[in-house]
Image: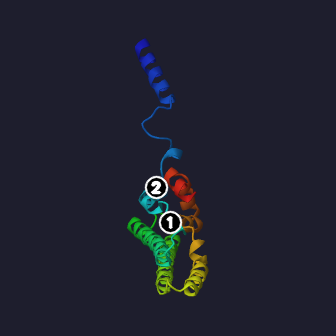
Amino acid sequence: MLVAGVAAAVLALGGCTGSSDEPEPSTQATAQDEWAHALCEALRPTTAEVQTPSGEAQDPAEAKQEIVTFLQTLRDRLREQGKVLADAGAPPEVGAESYESAKEALDTSAATLTSIIKRFKKADASSAEQMEASLMQLSESLAGPSSYQGPLADLSEGDPALKKAFENSDTCVALMS
């Protein structure tokens, strides 16, 4: 009888220790948390710093090429992000509106940069007037794309659950800062 009582007490105390194999419900990742983290991990390589043109090139053709290369790199990064987002698919348990909007914003920004690059390439680097006019036009054309915050911002704005999922991932927080 004493052994049975001790065994019952041990079992009862064992249930009170809080040491179970199951994590606390509040610490379990949601489907959105898992999707957001995987997306951010896949996006990380596309967010490395892009070297801006130095502005120190003495040759106008070289300076022009530095700018073109910079713009092409930005455009290519946007395209890569669009591919990553498409590969991730729409987030689970969330309406697809913010996802579709984020994909569209990436496509639009990349297309805008392609157009800007084409126009800028047409400028005659040997003509100071033409280069100055092209740089002014370039500056005006970049006003829209330069304010683009990226797909994580678009997705966060579109859905509070995704915003919370991005905030729960250190990787996502680092990308958004």
Q: Is residue 148 above or below residue 8?
A: below
Horizontal and vertical percent position of residue 102: 51, 72
Frontmost residue, 162 versus 177: 177
The residue at the point 49 percent across, 64 percent down is 51
Examine the image and state in which quarter residue 7 appears. top left
What amino acid is labelled 1 in the image? Val
- Element class at badge 1: loop
What amino acid is labelled 2 in the image? His
Q: Which mark is residue 37?
A: 2
- Element class at badge 2: helix
Frontmost residue, 171 versus 50: 50
Q: Is residue 62 above or below residue 35?
A: below
Examine the image and state in which quarter residue 72 appears. bottom left
| Mark before the other along the chain sequence, 2 or 1 | 2
Horizontal and vertical percent position of residue 128: 56, 84
Relative placement, left or right, of 83 versus 175 is left
Horizontal and vertical percent position of residue 39: 44, 60
Q: Which mark is residue 94?
A: 1
Asked whether residue 1 appears in the rendered view, the answer is no
The residue at the point 53 percent across, 86 percent down is 127
